[in-house]
Structures are given as structure tokens and as C-alpha cells.
Image (cartoon, rainbow, N blue to C red):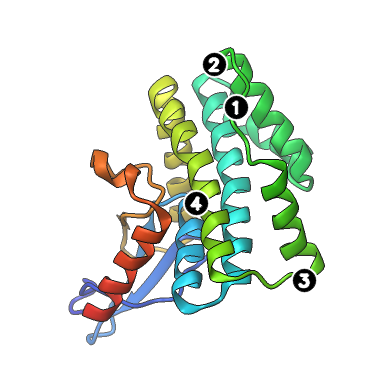
Amino acid sequence: MDDGIPAYPAFVEVRDDGRYVFTCTQGHRTVTVLQQQKFELLYEIGAYAILDGYYREAVASFASSLERFYEFFVKAKLFEGQVPENTIAEFWTQVASQSERQLGAFVCLYTQTFKRAPALLSNSRISFRNEVIHKGKIPTRDEALAYGQAVLDVMRPILADAKREFPQGVQRTVLQHLATAHQLGSAEPQATIGMPTIVSLTVTDVGHDHRSLAEAVEQLRWWRARW
């Protein structure tokens, strides 16, 4: 990085707040905000966990990705309905500590919008997830891939529904994330950047959404080898 401009690729740890601070050789600091939503990053982390052989961690990341995806859907739907941001924040506070309430909010809003119940994970997948997360089950690679694929199969069509039916709500949800991340900083120069992810709000290539998780993991392996 020179004159405060980061040279890419830059290798950094993934941050929860989406803010990445770079210092160039001249001592200039810049802040770069990653625009991807939490569900996009968590799913990517799960894929890398499979690549690295951490299958239990992969399952946990995929499960968390799905939960944050439901949150994203709910907020985007409410934004589309012109619900004020502070009201959405107050509502989410009431359900934030209980995943069952979040799932219920998602199912209710999806059904109200599309006049059909959403496709969810099967009971066997839910039981598998609970055994891994709560009972210490150590899954195999194949089991982790199968669970991750099941999560992907749930999220992709629902994400397409959301982007089609409430585009303004999706945009406002993304902008809220960016505004929050940028407000956390100081007077240092700030920029925004995006990255392609396996489950993605921004990738428009039709073939991208037809790749399996196994294919995506192999592509990650190829990119890692190049760097």
C-alpha cells in the first residue's frame, strides 16, 4: 500500500464490523468497509473451513449464515414496507436473543408476501445441526458438504425472491450496514469495497448461482494455490 491506497490482494482477518484499516509505507491510514452482509461472509467462512479440514466449524458457520440470512430478509421486507429504521431496530431487539422467534418472523413475512410457506431445512438437517452444535458431534467432510449444500439450496431461491419483490428494501439494508460501519471511524479516509461470495447479493452471472458448494470449494482451492 502506498500513499494510503491499499494494494490488492491484501490479506487480513475477517472482522465482525466490516472495517479494515490499512497503513501504507508512508504511514497513511485508510479505512475500507466491506459491503457484504454477515450471511454472505459466514457462508464463505464455512466453505473455507471445509477447505481447511475443519468440518465442525464449517457446519457452525453455515448454520449461523442461515440465521443471519433470515434477519436480512426480515429487515429488507420491513424496509420495503416503509417501516422506519428505528422501529425495525426496536422490533429486532425483541427477537435478537432467540433464533426461534427470528425464524417465526421470517416464516410469517415470507408467507404474507408470497402467499406460500418458505422451503426450510428438513428435520433431519436440523437434527444434524443440533448434534454438531450442541452435542459435540464431529461431522465428516461429506456430511459438512451436504449440510452446507442444503443451506445453500434454501437461501438461493429466497434471496432471488427478495431481490425481485423488494429491491428497495434490500438496498436500504445494505446501505444501513455501510452507514453503520462508516460511522464507527474517525476522520481517516474511508472507502467501500465488495467481493464475490458463494451466496451473493451482487454477483449477476447466472451460472454463479448454479454452482454447488463442492464446486465452489474447489474454486477456492484454486485461488488459494495461485496466491
Instruction: Decide which of 55, 63 is in the foreground and name it.
Output: 55
Is the C-beta separation of discs 3 and 2 under 8 Å?
Answer: no
- Residue furthest to the bottom: 25
Query: Residue tagged by mark 2?
Result: 114
Going from N to C along the chain, the mark reached first, 4 or 3, is: 3
From the top left corner, tell me how far across and down residue 43 is, in percent. 49, 57
Distance from the alpha carbon under mark 1 to that under mark 2: 9 Å
Distance from the alpha carbon under mark 4 to that under mark 3: 21 Å
Distance from the alpha carbon under mark 2 to that under mark 4: 24 Å
| Vertical comparison of 162 with 224: above or below | above
Instruction: Locate residue 24 relative to residue 118 in the image: left or right.
Output: left
Is the C-beta separation of discs 1 and 2 under 8 Å?
Answer: yes
Q: Please, what is the three-letter code of the amino acid marked with disc 3?
A: Gly
Distance from the alpha carbon under mark 1 to that under mark 3: 29 Å
Is the C-beta separation of discs 1 and 3 under 8 Å?
Answer: no
Going from N to C along the chain, the mark reached first, 2 or 4, is: 2
Query: Residue tagged by mark 3?
Result: 136
Residue 85: numbered disc? none
Q: Please, what is the three-letter code of the amino acid marked with disc 4?
A: Gln
Residue 149: numbered disc? 4
Instruction: Locate residue 18 relative to residue 106 in the image: left or right.
Output: left
